[in-house]
């Protein structure tokens, strides 16, 4: 697999603040990489260095297999966290401008813009000024701006912020389409459930350092405890087995959470009672739990 | 990363076109385009009203009013003894009488000698009209002096307004040296006495309309060769030839007008640049753009687009303001001077636009950006504050130094080129220094722009800005 993005030991300092400190990571072609971290962790600074907006104090960034060049920007779509557009210009004028900056002709940029407007059901705003649009629709225009020119690498910083659930769902669909089309995506978000659902791999930045990095499932597994979950229709509480927690599910089944050394005695006792065991599996923490543990 | 990779003409062109189109379609731009000439027209009329209310243009030009007496000295150094004392006496009596009778001088009571016979009459009338003089209507007291030194001393002491030396050169060619006090900076060459002395000489030689030199002198009676007599010495004044006083005044205003148009172009365009950056910084568009453009491309594109918008605006003003004067042949300018002024404007704009952009990048908001940029505006415009120095001593030390210092050169050199030009080496050095400084300003401005543009909150201290310049 080819690394679309290779970050090697990059650091950046602003006055007394070490914003990013020796971060290295790789993003492979076609994967969705989640860049996670609390506010002020250094995510935006790292993204700006990836895009050559900031120069790293040390380290290097390579994209598409070579040292980052400004010519590569035509193949990168970027949605910054702090976003804005020319509020007094018409939607199609803004999309045309952004498209031409990505190397499209006027006709191509307009056609591409119109295609996306149709797709997101906002074609009627084509000739409206941006300031006349709702915040959600402005956000959609901004997202379209990153997709015009068919980039090979998408960098979306908090794409769900300010969107209602319907629009969150639409953005997820857009992301899924990009993934299917083979576009590599770097997704920076605070929404752990979204990251968990959408990202193949995640990297967690805290205090300017990359504290976690790997496939989403592996990260969860690595940071799991020795707890196991047993779902059954039998109840053995008070029968000599140490059960950390038992919960009755809506289905009528009971979910027992036990330590690894208690799994075997629990299963033996359940079988003795003629209970049916539906599932036995290790308990993985959610990404949010991993995140909270990592940042203390 | 090499500069060629950081600046792609395609992207610069796209930004420039967008900035130009976005600016010239603004209501404020269009309104200014058409309202400014009206405002400038009003500004041109108001001083005339002020002059009229404050005692006329004589006081503005440092001359005496019509009701005052101006002493004009004549020294006769001809072998023939051309100047006849009786006509001096006649003139002085006539002037005193005219004031007492409140009649306009010297239209009435033309002496009989001027009733020339035959075809000479028409030619003399034409010649008289050509002489024209500001002293019509003023009271001139003619005096004689023993020598040119004595006459000069009277002028230096402020006891005479002009001193005319009538010698062999006058007999041969009609040229008479004249000593005048140092003229006020805005005075294009107006001083009293020319008409009165011309009249005196004509009367003195016209008693029998002879053939020979007297006839020639009747038709072209006086060509002054002026020397300003100041406290610090004497300096020949550039010959204005047969130019009309108003024409000379307009010609002297030309460099001021061009310098003003330059200043307008620079400040209008760089003001747009500053405002545009402030606005984009506030509405967060810049980060979106910087994901597609280098700071150098963005800055250069903005400079070109907004410079073109500024040039269009001030070019229109120039057309409206100067066009009629040029069309009526009231002013003229050499193509080389015009080329020099245009080069000054271009390089000056490149320099100041970079500085304004960097100011906009480090400012916390638009208001702060304007405050910082005021420093540049004042620096650029500073030569205009000492305009009289440029008008009176365009080759002096101060004017030369300011025209070689890159930050003041755009306006200073424009003024010098308009007044009487500058040595070629100084023009070359000025342009080289300005181009080098503009280049450095663009590189430095881009570096500050790169880091500062996404900064929000308090303005960084100077030490930090210098570090950006070094590290970016």
Image (spheres, grey):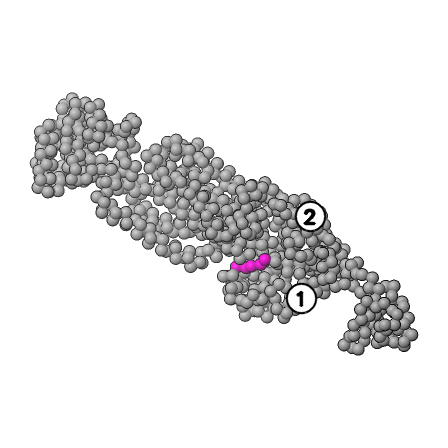
Residue B212 location, quadrant? top left
Q: Residues within 10 Å of mark 1 (few under 14, many from 20)?
A: some
The quarter of the image holding the N terminus of chain A is: bottom right
Task: Give x and y (percent) for residue A60.
Answer: 69, 46
Mark 2 or 1 closer to N-term? 2
Task: Indicate yes or no whether the magenta region holds residue B266.
Answer: no
- Tell me if residue B319 comes above or below residue B128 in the rendering: below
Name the dominant secondary structure of the magenta segment: loop
- Tell me if residue B319 comes above or below residue B336 in the rendering: below
Q: Which residue corresponds to mark 2?
A: A21
In terms of secondary structure, where does tag 2 sit?
strand
Residue B82 left/right relative to A280: left
Task: Give x and y (percent) for residue A32.
Answer: 71, 60
In terms of secondary structure, where does tag 1 sit?
helix
Residue A289 left/right relative to B121: right
Residue B52 left/right relative to A13: left
Residue positioned 76% across, 63% down in the render: A285
């Amino acid at each position: 697999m080819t690394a679309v993005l290779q970050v090697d030991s990059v650091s950046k300092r602003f006055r007394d603040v070490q914003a990013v400190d020796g971060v290295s990571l790789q993003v492979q072609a076609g994967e969705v990489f989640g860049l996670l971290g609390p506010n002020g962790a250094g995510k935006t600074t790292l993204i700006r260095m990836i895009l050559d907006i900031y120069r790293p104090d040390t380290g290097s960034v390579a994209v598409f297999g070579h040292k980052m060049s400004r010519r590569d920007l035509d193949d990168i779509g970027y949605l910054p966290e702090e976003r804005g557009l020319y509020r007094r210009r018409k939607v199609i004028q803004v999309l045309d401008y952004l498209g031409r900056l990505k190397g499209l002709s006027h006709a191509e940029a307009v056609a591409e813009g119109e295609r996306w407007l149709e797709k997101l059901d906002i074609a009627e705003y084509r000739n409206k000024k941006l300031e006349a649009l709702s915040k959600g629709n402005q956000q959609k225009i901004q997202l379209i701006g990153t997709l015009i020119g068919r980039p090979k690498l998408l960098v979306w910083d908090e794409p769900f912020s300010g969107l209602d659930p319907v629009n969150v769902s639409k953005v997820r669909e857009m992301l899924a389409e990009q993934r299917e089309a083979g576009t590599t995506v770097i997704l920076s978000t605070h929404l752990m459930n979204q990251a968990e659902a959408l990202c193949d791999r995640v990297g967690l930045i805290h205090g300017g350092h990359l504290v976690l990095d790997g496939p989403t499932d592996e990260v969860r597994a690595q940071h799991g405890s020795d707890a196991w979950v047993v779902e059954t229709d039998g109840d053995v509480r008070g029968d000599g087995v140490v059960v950390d927690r038992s919960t009755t599910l809506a289905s009528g089944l009971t979910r027992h959470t036990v330590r690894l050394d208690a799994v075997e005695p629990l299963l033996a006792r359940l079988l003795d009672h003629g209970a049916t065991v539906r599932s036995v599996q290790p308990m993985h923490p959610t990404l949010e739990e991993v995140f909270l543990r990592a940042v203390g | 990363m090499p500069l060629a990779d950081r600046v792609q003409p395609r992207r610069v062109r796209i930004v420039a076109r967008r900035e130009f189109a976005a600016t010239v379609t603004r209501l404020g731009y269009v309104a200014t385009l058409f309202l400014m000439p009206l405002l400038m027209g009003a500004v041109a009329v108001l001083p005339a009203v002020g002059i009229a209310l404050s005692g006329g243009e004589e006081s503005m030009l440092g001359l005496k009013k019509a009701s005052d007496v101006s002493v004009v000295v004549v020294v006769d150094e001809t072998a023939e003894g051309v100047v006849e004392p009786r006509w001096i006496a006649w003139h002085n009596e006539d002037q005193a009488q005219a004031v007492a009778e409140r009649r306009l001088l010297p239209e009435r009571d033309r002496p009989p000698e001027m009733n020339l016979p035959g075809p000479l009459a028409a030619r003399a009338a034409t010649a008289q009209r050509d002489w024209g003089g500001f002293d019509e209507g003023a009271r001139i007291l003619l005096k004689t002096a023993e020598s040119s030194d004595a006459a000069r001393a009277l002028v230096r002491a402020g006891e005479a307004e002009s001193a005319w030396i009538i010698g062999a050169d006058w007999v041969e060619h009609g040229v008479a040296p004249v000593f005048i006090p140092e003229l006020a900076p805005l005075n294009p060459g107006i001083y009293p006495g020319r008409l009165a002395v011309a009249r005196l000489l004509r009367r003195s030689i016209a008693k029998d309309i002879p053939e020979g030199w007297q006839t020639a002198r009747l038709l072209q009676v006086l060509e002054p060769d002026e020397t300003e007599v100041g406290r610090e010495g004497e300096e020949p004044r550039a010959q204005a030839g047969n130019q009309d006083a108003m024409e000379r005044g307009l010609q002297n205003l030309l460099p001021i007008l061009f310098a003003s148009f330059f200043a307008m172009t620079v400040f209008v365009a760089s003001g747009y640049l500053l405002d545009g950056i402030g606005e984009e910084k506030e509405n967060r568009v810049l980060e979106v753009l910087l994901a597609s453009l280098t700071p150098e491309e963005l800055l250069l594109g903005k400079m070109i687009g907004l410079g073109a918008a500024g040039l269009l605006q001030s070019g229109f003003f120039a057309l409206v303001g100067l066009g009629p004067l040029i069309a009526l042949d009231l002013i003229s300018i050499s193509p080389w001077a015009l080329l020099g002024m245009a080069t000054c404007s271009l390089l000056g704009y490149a320099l100041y636009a970079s500085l304004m952009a960097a100011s906009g990048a480090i400012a916390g908001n638009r208001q702060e950006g304007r405050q910082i940029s005021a420093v540049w505006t004042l620096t650029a415009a500073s030569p205009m504050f000492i305009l009289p120095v440029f008008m009176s001593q365009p080759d002096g030390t101060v004017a030369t130094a300011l025209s070689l210092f890159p930050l003041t050169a755009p306006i200073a050199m424009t003024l010098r080129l308009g007044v009487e030009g500058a040595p070629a080496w100084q023009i070359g050095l000025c342009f080289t220094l300005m181009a080098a400084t503009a280049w450095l300003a663009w590189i430095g401005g881009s570096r500050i722009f790169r880091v500062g543009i996404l900064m929000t909150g308090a303005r960084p201290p100077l030490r930090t800005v210098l570090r950006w310049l070094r590290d970016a």
